[in-house]
Image (spheres, rainbow, N blue to C red):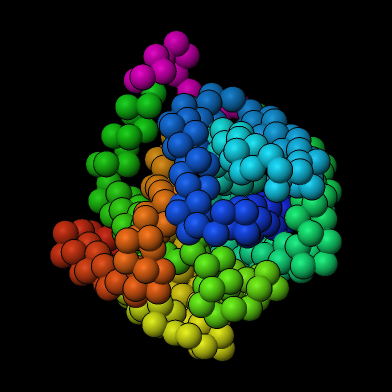
Amino acid sequence: MLIAAVTSTLASRAVALTVAYQMYQLTKDPLTLGLLGLVEAIPALSLALLGGVVADRTDRRRILLLTIGVEVLCAALFALYAPHAQAGGIWPLLALIFALGIARGFSDPALPAFQAQVVPRELLLRASAWRSSAWQAAGIIGPALGGALYAWRGPQGAYTVAFALFLISLGCVLYVKSKGRPAFTPGEPLGQSIKAGLAFVLQRQVLVGSMALDLFSVLFGGAIALLPVFASDILRVGPTGLGLLVAAPSVGALAVMLLATRRPPGRGAGRTLLLAVAGFGVSMIVFGLSHNLALSVLALVAAGVFDGISMVIRSATLQLNTPDHMRGRVNAVSGMFIGASNELGAFESGIAARLLGTARSVWLGGIVTLIVVAATAALAPELRAMNLADIED
């Protein structure tokens, strides 16, 4: 499962960077980068609740095999189309991104639910840190790999390597034994199953509070979608420098996640989560104001450290507070929050960059993130007082 996650993340990160930089070179419009995120978010978010129900009624391994197969096909089509993009335009690229969004609508709820079936409950907190560490390690190499391949062999070279990595991921999931279909109520209407998943989350302040904190902080404070603009027009470092910028947050996140495998954030986790998101906001303010590559990279590394802390806590909170038969639906709701914060956040970033200017939109977003943290701390006292060590015991 770890190898499958690493190779799939390597491929998806390389594809994401390659598509974003290729589209910006074709259009020179930052709003295009926001549109890219929106096109993936529409199917992913629209299908998330249905995907959660399917993950709670079906063999989750089978879902992953199907969705990774779609990723393999899309990577091959990206590689075939890349030489013709100048003449054909951006719409075929957006169509393939839309197809990947459909696959995500089903894979995002199934993957963490299946991983939780593989790991015993008493090891979930530590395993969450290991999974996140592996994901972040791939997040460091993937963008750098995509940027280097783009500079060396063009977009077609990057897409071809991603195709091979997706194939390896597919083979690894085939090697993992099926854990069977989770228990569910036979004959339960689809709408009732979806409603039960939503109610489970909304009735638990630690779940809805941590999800909302991630949603609004990344929605307004994230700058990842605009990194091609910083690399091309502000810092002037090209595709190789873009790979460095995109990888920088993962460097910080990996460092803190490896520490978390030894010392998981158990007691005082709620307070730590709020402080980490506040630190993320401050890092975005520094990045938005910077015109120096070294300072920009340092700010992004710091943002990754704080985001890594919050990611480990949010993942463990979800797994430790959710029974197995509900994990698909609860992960679907979580995926909607994450998808809204990432893809819709990318769209919001594109609009804000056009209206306010790229750099100004980023540091103002960091200020909004600090306001969000203060509001969450006031409105969610159970989240503020949360201790994961008590839940794990």
Residue 369 lies in the magenta-colored region: no
Q: Residue 122 in the image: x percent, y percent?
A: 53, 56
Q: Position of residue 381 (x, y in %)?
A: 19, 62
Q: Residue at x 59, y 50 (%)?
A: 120
x 42%, y 57%: residue: 350
- Name the main secondary structure of what is drawn in magenta: loop
Quadrant including the C terminus = bottom left
User: Looking at the picture, does residue 7 appear above or below residue 109?
Assistant: below
Q: Is residue 104 above or below residue 368?
A: above
Which segment did they paint magenta? 181-192
Compared across the picture, whether 78 is left or right of 108 comes to right
Is 299 drawn above or below residue 179 in the view shown?
below
Asked whether the viewer can see residue 383, the reply is: yes
Residue 296 rendering spot, x and y as whole percentages: 51, 82
Q: Residue furthest front?
A: 87
Q: Does 190 appear in magenta?
A: yes
Q: Position of residue 27 (x, y in %)?
A: 57, 54
Q: Nearer the viewer, residue 166 or 261?
A: 166
Outermost left residue: 378
User: 79 or 109, which is in the foreground?
Assistant: 79
